[in-house]
Amino acid sequence: MKVIDNFITNESLLEEIRNDENFFPQTMGDEQKVNYSIHQYHDQDSKHYSPYMFWDGWWRSPANTLKKRVIQEIWKDNLPLPYDQICGFEYWAKTFKPGQYLGLHIDEDSHLYKESQIFNGPTIGCVYYPDHESIDGGFLELHEFLLEDGSKSQLERGVLESMASPIEKRERIAFKPNRLIVFDAGHILHNTTPTESGTRRVLVVNVWSEDKKPLGLQNNGFYLEK
Protein backbone atom coordinates (compact mmCIF):
# COMPACT_ATOMS: atom_id res chain seq x y z
CA MET A 1 0.00 0.00 0.00
CA LYS A 2 1.11 3.54 -0.71
CA VAL A 3 -0.34 6.76 0.75
CA ILE A 4 0.72 10.03 -0.88
CA ASP A 5 -0.37 13.34 0.64
CA ASN A 6 -0.52 16.61 -1.31
CA PHE A 7 -0.55 14.38 -4.35
CA ILE A 8 -1.50 16.79 -7.14
CA THR A 9 0.84 19.77 -7.02
CA ASN A 10 -0.62 21.49 -10.08
CA GLU A 11 -3.01 24.00 -8.50
CA SER A 12 -4.76 24.75 -11.78
CA LEU A 13 -5.62 21.05 -12.17
CA LEU A 14 -6.99 20.94 -8.63
CA GLU A 15 -9.09 24.01 -9.32
CA GLU A 16 -10.48 22.40 -12.48
CA ILE A 17 -11.62 19.38 -10.47
CA ARG A 18 -13.19 21.53 -7.76
CA ASN A 19 -15.01 23.73 -10.26
CA ASP A 20 -16.27 20.93 -12.52
CA GLU A 21 -19.88 20.28 -11.52
CA ASN A 22 -19.91 17.00 -13.44
CA PHE A 23 -16.72 15.46 -12.03
CA PHE A 24 -18.62 13.94 -9.11
CA PRO A 25 -22.28 12.93 -8.89
CA GLN A 26 -24.32 15.40 -6.87
CA THR A 27 -25.60 12.62 -4.63
CA MET A 28 -25.83 8.85 -4.30
CA GLY A 29 -29.28 9.19 -2.78
CA ASP A 30 -30.35 9.12 0.84
CA GLU A 31 -29.56 5.52 1.80
CA GLN A 32 -27.01 5.30 4.57
CA LYS A 33 -25.19 2.42 2.88
CA VAL A 34 -24.00 3.45 -0.58
CA ASN A 35 -23.83 0.86 -3.38
CA TYR A 36 -26.10 -1.63 -1.64
CA SER A 37 -26.61 -3.71 -4.81
CA ILE A 38 -24.43 -4.48 -7.82
CA HIS A 39 -24.61 -1.91 -10.63
CA GLN A 40 -26.95 0.23 -8.52
CA TYR A 41 -25.76 3.47 -10.14
CA HIS A 42 -24.56 2.10 -13.48
CA ASP A 43 -27.85 2.14 -15.37
CA GLN A 44 -28.52 5.38 -17.26
CA ASP A 45 -32.10 5.23 -15.99
CA SER A 46 -30.86 5.12 -12.41
CA LYS A 47 -32.07 8.00 -10.28
CA HIS A 48 -28.47 8.61 -9.18
CA TYR A 49 -26.33 7.85 -12.23
CA SER A 50 -22.61 7.27 -11.70
CA PRO A 51 -21.37 4.73 -14.26
CA TYR A 52 -18.36 2.49 -14.42
CA MET A 53 -16.08 4.04 -17.04
CA PHE A 54 -13.10 2.64 -18.93
CA TRP A 55 -10.08 4.13 -20.69
CA ASP A 56 -7.34 2.22 -22.50
CA GLY A 57 -4.60 4.60 -21.36
CA TRP A 58 -2.70 7.67 -22.54
CA TRP A 59 -0.25 5.59 -24.59
CA ARG A 60 -3.18 4.43 -26.80
CA SER A 61 -5.64 7.31 -26.83
CA PRO A 62 -5.50 10.97 -25.73
CA ALA A 63 -6.31 12.14 -22.21
CA ASN A 64 -9.14 14.26 -23.62
CA THR A 65 -11.30 14.58 -20.49
CA LEU A 66 -10.57 15.93 -17.03
CA LYS A 67 -10.96 12.52 -15.38
CA LYS A 68 -8.52 10.97 -17.86
CA ARG A 69 -5.99 13.69 -17.14
CA VAL A 70 -6.29 12.99 -13.42
CA ILE A 71 -5.90 9.25 -14.06
CA GLN A 72 -2.73 9.90 -16.01
CA GLU A 73 -1.42 12.06 -13.16
CA ILE A 74 -2.17 9.26 -10.69
CA TRP A 75 -0.71 6.35 -12.58
CA LYS A 76 2.11 7.76 -14.72
CA ASP A 77 4.63 6.93 -11.96
CA ASN A 78 2.72 4.22 -10.07
CA LEU A 79 1.93 1.49 -12.58
CA PRO A 80 3.06 -2.01 -11.50
CA LEU A 81 3.30 -3.32 -15.08
CA PRO A 82 4.71 -2.13 -18.41
CA TYR A 83 2.27 -0.38 -20.75
CA ASP A 84 1.98 -3.36 -23.10
CA GLN A 85 0.73 -5.55 -20.24
CA ILE A 86 -2.06 -3.16 -19.23
CA CYS A 87 -5.43 -3.15 -21.00
CA GLY A 88 -6.65 0.00 -19.26
CA PHE A 89 -8.34 1.74 -16.35
CA GLU A 90 -11.78 1.23 -14.87
CA TYR A 91 -12.94 4.29 -12.94
CA TRP A 92 -15.91 5.91 -11.25
CA ALA A 93 -16.73 8.71 -8.81
CA LYS A 94 -18.88 8.81 -5.69
CA THR A 95 -20.17 11.44 -3.29
CA PHE A 96 -20.82 10.60 0.37
CA LYS A 97 -23.07 12.81 2.48
CA PRO A 98 -22.75 12.88 6.28
CA GLY A 99 -23.67 9.47 7.69
CA GLN A 100 -23.14 7.57 4.44
CA TYR A 101 -20.59 4.80 4.03
CA LEU A 102 -19.47 1.97 1.76
CA GLY A 103 -19.96 -1.53 3.16
CA LEU A 104 -17.57 -4.48 3.07
CA HIS A 105 -16.51 -5.28 -0.48
CA ILE A 106 -13.68 -6.15 -2.84
CA ASP A 107 -13.44 -4.40 -6.21
CA GLU A 108 -14.23 -6.93 -8.92
CA ASP A 109 -15.17 -7.55 -12.51
CA SER A 110 -18.76 -6.68 -11.69
CA HIS A 111 -20.13 -7.74 -15.08
CA LEU A 112 -18.52 -11.18 -14.72
CA TYR A 113 -19.75 -11.59 -11.16
CA LYS A 114 -23.27 -10.51 -12.05
CA GLU A 115 -23.34 -13.09 -14.85
CA SER A 116 -21.66 -16.07 -13.19
CA GLN A 117 -20.84 -15.25 -9.52
CA ILE A 118 -17.16 -15.81 -10.37
CA PHE A 119 -14.76 -13.34 -8.77
CA ASN A 120 -11.95 -11.67 -10.70
CA GLY A 121 -10.13 -8.62 -9.37
CA PRO A 122 -8.03 -5.86 -10.97
CA THR A 123 -4.25 -5.84 -10.69
CA ILE A 124 -4.18 -2.81 -8.40
CA GLY A 125 -6.41 0.13 -7.51
CA CYS A 126 -6.55 3.47 -5.79
CA VAL A 127 -8.80 6.05 -4.21
CA TYR A 128 -8.15 9.75 -4.58
CA TYR A 129 -9.66 12.57 -2.51
CA PRO A 130 -9.33 15.92 -4.31
CA ASP A 131 -11.43 18.00 -1.92
CA HIS A 132 -9.80 21.01 -0.31
CA GLU A 133 -11.66 20.90 3.03
CA SER A 134 -11.24 18.32 5.79
CA ILE A 135 -14.20 16.36 7.14
CA ASP A 136 -14.94 14.34 10.26
CA GLY A 137 -14.95 10.57 9.79
CA GLY A 138 -14.97 8.64 6.54
CA PHE A 139 -12.05 6.26 7.18
CA LEU A 140 -10.95 3.68 4.63
CA GLU A 141 -10.56 0.36 6.47
CA LEU A 142 -8.47 -2.51 5.09
CA HIS A 143 -9.03 -6.01 6.45
CA GLU A 144 -6.72 -9.03 6.59
CA PHE A 145 -8.86 -11.16 4.28
CA LEU A 146 -7.58 -11.69 0.71
CA LEU A 147 -9.81 -13.15 -2.01
CA GLU A 148 -8.32 -15.22 -4.81
CA ASP A 149 -9.32 -14.82 -8.44
CA GLY A 150 -11.68 -17.56 -9.61
CA SER A 151 -13.47 -17.81 -6.26
CA LYS A 152 -17.17 -18.65 -6.56
CA SER A 153 -20.05 -16.84 -4.81
CA GLN A 154 -17.77 -15.16 -2.27
CA LEU A 155 -19.29 -11.70 -2.62
CA GLU A 156 -22.77 -12.65 -1.48
CA ARG A 157 -24.28 -10.88 1.51
CA GLY A 158 -23.20 -12.48 4.74
CA VAL A 159 -20.13 -14.20 3.29
CA LEU A 160 -17.82 -11.18 3.37
CA GLU A 161 -19.15 -10.13 6.76
CA SER A 162 -17.84 -13.42 8.16
CA MET A 163 -14.36 -12.55 6.89
CA ALA A 164 -14.15 -9.08 8.47
CA SER A 165 -11.21 -8.41 10.78
CA PRO A 166 -11.82 -7.10 14.30
CA ILE A 167 -11.42 -3.34 14.35
CA GLU A 168 -8.09 -3.48 16.20
CA LYS A 169 -6.60 -5.49 13.30
CA ARG A 170 -7.85 -3.25 10.50
CA GLU A 171 -5.60 -0.74 8.81
CA ARG A 172 -7.46 2.57 8.95
CA ILE A 173 -6.60 5.46 6.63
CA ALA A 174 -8.22 8.82 7.29
CA PHE A 175 -9.76 11.06 4.67
CA LYS A 176 -7.45 13.94 3.86
CA PRO A 177 -7.77 16.48 1.04
CA ASN A 178 -5.53 15.75 -1.96
CA ARG A 179 -4.60 12.31 -0.57
CA LEU A 180 -3.96 9.33 -2.88
CA ILE A 181 -4.16 5.78 -1.54
CA VAL A 182 -2.83 3.01 -3.79
CA PHE A 183 -3.62 -0.56 -2.66
CA ASP A 184 -4.72 -4.00 -3.84
CA ALA A 185 -8.39 -3.04 -4.02
CA GLY A 186 -9.12 -6.08 -6.18
CA HIS A 187 -8.19 -8.67 -3.54
CA ILE A 188 -8.18 -7.00 -0.10
CA LEU A 189 -11.48 -6.76 1.77
CA HIS A 190 -12.22 -3.12 2.57
CA ASN A 191 -14.94 -0.64 3.53
CA THR A 192 -15.40 2.96 4.63
CA THR A 193 -16.85 4.36 7.82
CA PRO A 194 -19.60 7.01 7.87
CA THR A 195 -18.71 10.66 7.63
CA GLU A 196 -19.87 12.63 10.66
CA SER A 197 -19.89 16.01 8.94
CA GLY A 198 -18.99 17.37 5.54
CA THR A 199 -19.19 15.76 2.12
CA ARG A 200 -16.58 13.21 1.05
CA ARG A 201 -15.91 12.85 -2.69
CA VAL A 202 -13.77 10.11 -4.11
CA LEU A 203 -12.42 9.04 -7.49
CA VAL A 204 -11.73 5.30 -7.71
CA VAL A 205 -9.42 3.92 -10.41
CA ASN A 206 -8.55 0.24 -10.97
CA VAL A 207 -5.85 -1.05 -13.30
CA TRP A 208 -6.67 -4.13 -15.42
CA SER A 209 -4.03 -6.26 -17.14
CA GLU A 210 -4.09 -7.64 -20.67
CA ASP A 211 -4.23 -11.21 -19.41
CA LYS A 212 -7.27 -10.51 -17.22
CA LYS A 213 -9.57 -8.18 -19.13
CA PRO A 214 -12.92 -7.29 -17.53
CA LEU A 215 -16.05 -8.67 -19.15
CA GLY A 216 -17.45 -5.17 -19.57
CA LEU A 217 -15.06 -4.66 -22.48
CA GLN A 218 -16.68 -7.55 -24.33
CA ASN A 219 -20.34 -6.81 -23.61
CA ASN A 220 -20.08 -3.00 -23.94
CA GLY A 221 -20.80 -2.69 -20.25
CA PHE A 222 -18.65 0.39 -19.66
CA TYR A 223 -19.36 4.05 -20.30
CA LEU A 224 -16.63 5.54 -22.48
CA GLU A 225 -15.93 9.24 -22.02
CA LYS A 226 -15.41 11.30 -25.17
Image (cartoon, grey):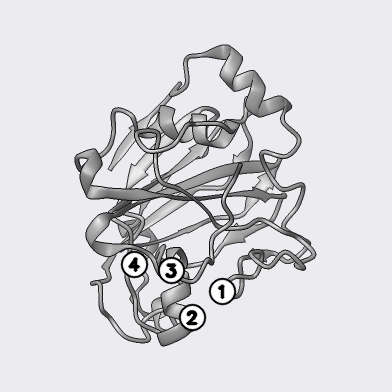
- Left or right: residue 121 compared with residue 89: left
| Total numbered labels placed on residues in the image | 4
**What percent of the width, then of the height, locates residue 139?**
50, 48
Q: CA distance from mark 2 to mark 3?
A: 14 Å
The mark nearer the N terminus, 2 or 3, is 2
Q: Quadrant of residue 180?
A: top left
Amino acid type, mark 4: Ser
- Left or right: residue 102 compared with residue 15: left
Q: CA distance from mark 4 to mark 3?
A: 36 Å
Q: Any mark on residue 114, and which? A: 2
User: Nearer the viewer's eye, disc 4 or disc 3?
Assistant: 3
The mark nearer the N terminus, 4 or 1, is 1
Residue holding disc 4: 165
User: Nearer the viewer's eye, disc 4 or disc 2?
Assistant: 2
Residue holding disc 1: 38
The mark nearer the N terminus, 4 or 3, is 4
Helix, strand or loop status at disc 3: loop
Residue under the point 56% across and 36% down:
67
**What percent of the width, then of the height, locates residue 158?**
46, 84
- Which one is in front, 63 or 149? 63
Amino acid type, mark 2: Lys
